[in-house]
């Protein structure tokens, strides 16, 4: 029996619309649309009017072109890697050139249009301000962009510092600085294009997002456990009084990471049921004493979103989403 992962495409579209602040709101669909499925997510967004998409890697761009066909503009954050020139040309992908080396590669074998990614203080990807005088002559970029390191902390001084650096070096064409967090920092950060990712998928820092994901796990077996009996690997959970323990079909191989052990809660309808003991590879053990004999429990749903579950495991919603495994029965609602 497979667990059921339900993805609400209408909520993704609604979140995309709710994040629109400028003429152009792109959609970041890297990493299989944050684990939720590149093809259905990108098609739904394109149908709703999205024309500009970002992925991280060349292969993701090729896959996205095959999904969307001609017309959509597809940017690749990782830029132009050696050996990928033909893919960029054939699939009309736009590289975000990140270094002098990538710019020289593009100058030798131009693949079409290009973007420039500038480093304004994150020191991860992008040309340094001092590199800009050393670029080969490539004509004008179709986009100049940079990325904020601290946009999920509105009061962090690095936001304003990166903004003023970007204002100084980005020129006047089509510019983009804001992902989800930057979109929420205010109009100064929007420029001509915003490019949210996590907010589309219902994650923080977009606190007003509509929830997108429901994950329901089937119960395989229920047993009564006496006071003093232990449950699961390492016998880390010991019943303090008689408890009813349900064993559910999903585990860390499905992205329900082991760090959730002892911290996460599942829901039988409106009844919270704490995880009892450690997460196994394929199984969870849950205290359903207060819930009767449920046949399914939700680990993501109306009572617990991706960020609440992430909190229980000491991580972030991004990681919960992108870890969701391949063994779920996935369905999409529109
Ligand atoms: C992932 C990514 C985004 C989207 O970020 P979110 O926080 O998910 O909105 C935007 N820009 C760059 C460069 C990224 O790597």
Image: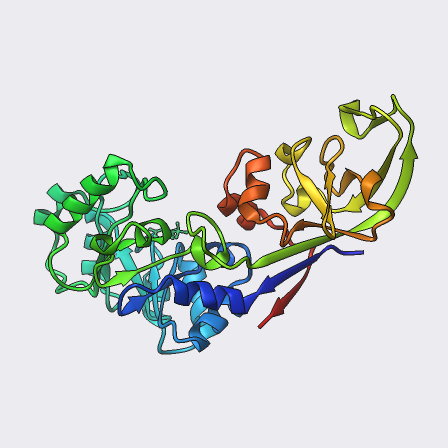
Q: Residue furthest top?
A: 228
Front residue of 298 and 177:
298
Q: Is residue 36 left or right of residue 168?
A: right
Against 323, residue 24 (above or below) is below
The front one of 82 and 334 is 334
Q: Is 76 drawn above or below residue 156 in the view shown?
A: below
What is the quadrant of the C terminus in the image?
bottom right
Estimate the x, y position of residue 53 in percent, counting from the top left. Answer: 37, 65
Q: Is residue 77 above or below residue 119?
A: below
Out of 184 and 93, give the one closest to the viewer: 184
- Is residue 334 left or right of 203 when viewed as pictured? right
Measured from the top left, where is residue 293 in percent x and y?
A: 87, 48
Q: Is residue 43 left or right of residue 216?
A: left
Residue drawn where x is 75% and y is 30% of the image: 277
Q: Looking at the picture, how far across and down is residue 213, in whole percent?
A: 59, 57
Residue 198 lies, in percent from the top left, at 44, 53
Quadrant assignment, res 77: bottom left
Question: In which quadrant of the rendered image does the N terminus lie?
Answer: bottom right
Q: Write down the quadrant of residue 155 in the picture.
A: top left
Identify whether 128 is placed above or below 16.
above
Quadrant hosting residue 125: top left
Can residue 260 be seen? yes
Q: How is the image coloured?
A: rainbow
Asked whether residue 63 appears in the rendered view, the answer is no
């Amino acid at each position: 029996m497979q667990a059921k992962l339900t993805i609400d495409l209408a909520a993704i579209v609604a979140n995309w619309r709710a994040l629109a602040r400028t003429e152009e709101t792109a959609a970041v669909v890297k990493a299989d649309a944050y684990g939720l499925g590149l093809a259905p997510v990108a098609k739904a967004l394109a149908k709703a009017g999205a024309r500009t998409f970002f992925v991280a890697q060349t292969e993701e761009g090729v896959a996205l072109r095959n999904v969307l066909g001609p017309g959509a503009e597809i940017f690749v954050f990782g830029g132009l890697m050696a050996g990928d020139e033909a893919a960029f040309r054939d699939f009309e992908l736009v590289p975000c050139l990140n270094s002098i080396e990538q710019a020289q590669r593009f100058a030798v074998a131009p693949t079409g249009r290009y973007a420039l990614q500038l480093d304004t203080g994150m020191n991860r990807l992008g040309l340094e301000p001092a590199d800009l005088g050393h670029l080969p002559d490539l004509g004008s970029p179709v986009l100049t962009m940079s990325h904020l390191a601290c946009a999920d902390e509105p009061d962090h001084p690095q936001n304003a510092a990166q903004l003023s650096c970007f204002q100084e070096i980005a020129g006047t064409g089509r510019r983009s600085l804001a992902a989800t967090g930057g979109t929420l920092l205010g109009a100064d950060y929007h420029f001509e294009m915003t490019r949210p990712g996590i907010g589309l998928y219902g994650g923080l820092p977009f606190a007003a997002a509509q929830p997108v994901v429901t994950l329901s796990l089937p119960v395989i077996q229920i047993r009564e456990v006496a006071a003093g009996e232990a449950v699961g690997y390492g016998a880390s959970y010991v019943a303090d009084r008689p408890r009813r323990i349900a064993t559910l079909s999903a585990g860390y191989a499905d992205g329900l990471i082991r760090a959730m052990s002892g911290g996460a809660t599942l829901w039988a309808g409106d009844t919270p049921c704490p995880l009892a003991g450690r997460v196994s590879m394929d199984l969870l053990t849950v205290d359903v004493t207060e819930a009767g004999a449920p046949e399914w429990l939700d680990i993501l749903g109306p009572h617990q979103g991706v960020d609440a579950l992430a909190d229980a495991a000491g991580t972030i919603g991004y990681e919960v989403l992108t870890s969701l495994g391949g063994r779920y029965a996935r369905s999409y609602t529109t």
